[in-house]
Amino acid sequence: MIGGLFTMSWPIHSWVFLHDCLFQAKLIVVEVYREPFPGKRIRSIMRYMLLLYSAEDAGPQPESEEFGAHMEEWFTFTNEVEAAGVMLGGEALEPSTTATSVQVRDGEMLTTDGPFAETKEVLGGFYMIDVPDLDAARMWAAKIPSAPFGTVEIRPIMELPEH
């Protein structure tokens, strides 16, 4: 243990082709663990939510000619995140007009049809990813097809102790 961090390493042997010659390469993989709670050791890979916000009328609309190409960008991005092995989940959301907001005040439940906040940009979907750090999360967020006309909010997922 170094400064509250646990480290584990092991060699990986692999064969590499370089200029038509076969070489054996030995890589050392290091996994770093941290202990955020006494007795609870977790990998230091971080989980992030990429929350996708945009105005509902921003970008290509379903009835437009550009919509098919825009959807292909989404499929390509999702396939890339999955192939990289960092995607933990993600979904698109129905329009904000289908939302129901719930509040509890003085022990009473209040419900309102529609989103909680009156804003131009609304939450349209999310990706949950598992990457080494915030820089890697930023890299994936910048590739999201709605980033040019919306906002991608990156939020770390809180690690809670098991009970």
Image: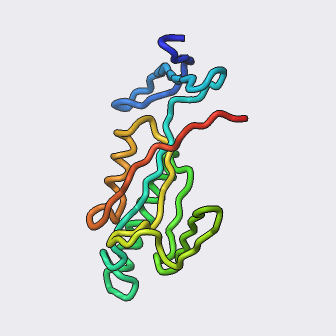
Name the foreground residue: 83 vs 45.
Answer: 45
Q: Quadrant of the C terminus?
A: top right
Q: How many marks?
A: 0
Name the foreground residue: 137 vs 76.
Answer: 137
Most extreme residue toward the right is 163
Colouring of the image: rainbow
Q: Is residue 22 left or right of residue 60?
A: right
Name the foreground residue: 157 vs 21.
Answer: 157
Measured as percent of width and height from the top left, residue 144 is found at 36, 59
| Residue at 48%, 80% in the rendered image | 97
Most extreme residue toward the front is 106
Most extreme residue toward the bottom is 63
Q: Is residue 75 left or right of residue 160?
A: left
Measured as percent of width and height from the top left, residue 137 is found at 39, 45
Measured as percent of width and height from the top left, residue 124 is found at 44, 68
Most extreme residue toward the left is 148
Give the quarter of the image for residue 72: bottom left
Q: Quadrant of the N terminus?
A: top right
| Residue at 50%, 68% in the rendered image | 92
Up the image or down, 65 lies above or below 8; here it is below
Name the foreground residue: 30 vs 141.
Answer: 141
| Residue at 43%, 57% in the rendered image | 51
Up the image or down, 46 lies above or below 38; here it is below
